[in-house]
Image (tube, coloured by chain):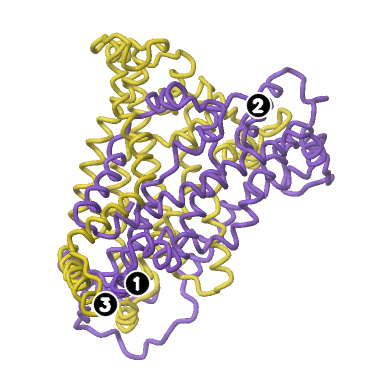
Chain colours: A purple, B yellow
Amino acid sequence: MSTSASGMSASATAKSSLDTVVADQTTAGAATAFPTSAGSPTSALTAGKLRRSPKQGSPGRGKRNIEPFTVVSYIGVGTFGLFALIPLWMIIAGSFTAESTLAKSGYSLFPEPFSLDAYASIFTGAAVFEGYAATLFITVIGTVLSLSATASLSWVIARRMPRISKPLAIFAYIPMLFTGGLVPLYLLVTQVLHLKNSWFSVILPHMMAPFLIFVAVSFFRQLPEEILDSAKVDGAGELRIFFQIVLPLSKPILAVIALFYAVSYWNEWFTAMLFISDPDKYPLQLMLQNLIANVTNAAELPGSSANVAPVYQLRLALTVVTIGPILLAYPFAQRYFVKGLTLGATKG
Amino acid sequence: MSKTTTASRDIGRKTTPAGKAAGTASRKRPSRRSGRDGGLLLLLAAPGIVWFLVFCYAPMAGLVVAFKSFDVSKGIFESPWNGLDNFKYFIASGDAPHIVMNTLVLNVLFLAATLGAGLALAIMLNELRARVFKKFMQSAIFFPYFVSPIVVSIILQVLLAGAGGHGGAANDVLGIFNLPEVSWYTEPGPWPWILTIVKVWQMGGYMSVIFLAAITAIPEEVYEAGMLDGASRARMAMSITLPLLKPTAAILLVLGVGRIFYGDFGTIFAIIGDNGTLFSTTDVIDTYVFRSLRTIGDFGTTAAIGLFQSVVGFILVTAAVLVQRRYSKESSIL
């Protein structure tokens, strides 16, 4: 490669000076207040001064157009992208492939012959609509409850009210360190609250996510205090401040939190499996899980592959139906997820 | 940091009634005012407080079941005590060592692989200049995070078991290289690695988002200096980006280690389910607890295992949080 011996030593010095930058940055991070959100410790780097390494790079070395590392990066990211997408594509392609082909030659990347049989049989029965209804109920009601409770609790924590905010923060923090576990929760929901076979048994156990409380608190703390103070001067009470000033100013973060909750409710199946035994009340994910079990049973029967009901195509089609809404909403919602993650990741 | 802000806020609060008094005729004493505010704020927090009490704190109290011979008809608090019998029963069953081992091994694999993949992806994504390609790829690699465990398990069946007795895509690939087909679902050996690949698939994009956010916080001048020194892009990635991502990686690592005693129940159970042949390498504490709750219905013993997990987990998480707070003071809500 083009790296000469002198170039190597120059980079080595550059590296050591960078190490000191990193060290500076750690101490600076502890001492100075962080100006903004970013939440990532590296943002403190702006406070650290960069020491230029004494040796300058050899003059006349121009910008190279395409470096090997850039090429490697394109290939690496592209490969991972395919790794991420191909399994999903196989599901979608398989759901449009005729059952006879699936049974004879297995899954492939292209649906041939093209068939809508599975979708037709899914949407003629009432089951999938009931599943959708259950999942929609859990997702919509759950998200509304979660968002309201999270936003208001987080605001009170972020408000820094003496004798209230800090104990409340600790109160919300302890369950992250220590949990009762599955058995007491099971007994609580079934024996004490009697929520078995109610959709609320799926909603309530996961109603508040500590991670999203962190996200909300760290966003609320960035709101300009002047606005709150002036509202206070104008005689606004705490409730008015929250509903008429804080909430409208926080729409972006509320969207982030709502989306995170909505996806987790949509995908929730474990609590449903624990508490919902009535097949009429199964949400989509549980229907799907049931179908897996049935397919496995069907596949274990000897010689069943010849004339079995369209189970393989069917479960793929049901999978597509289940992830469909997420797949459709994702392109629009993705930036919100990234934003929420950026704000809260290093705080969870 | 928090001290100064609180101080400035207090000043703001004290001046408020004064300003108000000057502006209008109504006078309210500061103490009464803040008392009412406190009440209103508590009202605002009430739903959250109630939820935490019922769904987090009550189950903690419910852990006394671990020391009882639980009888459904008598309820949690009326059932007779039986001391440490539940714990003895769990230890006598001989399952403890391997499920604890599996939990630790799997989580270490998951943590190392997802952190490594996230770091590599973020650094490589940072190199991309073609905007449309970059955006598309970022969306693509983040998407699996939003796929439910059930769907993941179906994808795995498609890839590993195939349909109608045909070996699935993984065996097709093995066939290209003239390797013998593997009956994946009866072979416990490869499963820790399969689950690790699944985890990387799910979490690689998620981790890369976090690291990419940290990379964007690195000031441009550092790279300009690197360019002046004639560093190649690869060298800048190795000597600038990577060292500056260390703090972020350290925090994620510490937090991950803190949660090492909690398996990813959803994904593992959705994939393995009740497939007993795979338990020797994949059964973790959470799946074990759930299965014994469902099949044996022995609340006392399962609660005892849960308590054991919570206590060890608590020690690890607390240690992790203490270590993490030493690294970054502002990253806690307290």
Residue type at mark 2 is: Pro
Q: Are marks 3 and 2 in contact (CB under 8 Å)?
A: no
| Left or right of residue B206: residue A273 | right
**Residue at 37% from the left image edge and 57% from the top image edge:** A215
**Residue at 56% from the left image edge and 34% from the top image edge:** A199
Residue A39 in which image quadrant: bottom left
**Residue at 40% from the left image edge and 55% from the top image edge:** A151
Residue A277 in which image quadrant: top right
Residue under label 2, please give it.
Answer: A279
Residue B311: x %, y % from top left: 25, 30
The answer for how far apart the CA atoms under marks 2 and 1 are is 57 Å
Residue under label 1, please give it.
Answer: B236
Residue A317 in which image quadrant: top right
Task: Report if residue B145 is visible in the image.
Answer: no
> Under tag 1, what secondary structure?
helix
Residue type at mark 1 is: Met
Residue under label 3, please give it.
Answer: B24
Between marks 3 and 2 in the image, the one whose residue lies nearer the viewer: 3
Q: Given the image, what chain letter belongs to the residue carrying mark 3? A: B
Label 1 and label 3 in one chain:
yes
Residue type at mark 3 is: Thr
Between marks 2 and 1 in the image, the one whose residue lies nearer the viewer: 2
Q: Residues within 10 Å of mark 1 (few under 14, many from 20)?
A: many
Of residues A125 and A66, the one drawn nearer to the viewer in this rendering: A125
Residue B291: x %, y % from top left: 46, 21
Residue A193: x %, y % from top left: 45, 27
N-terminal-most mark, 1 or 3: 3
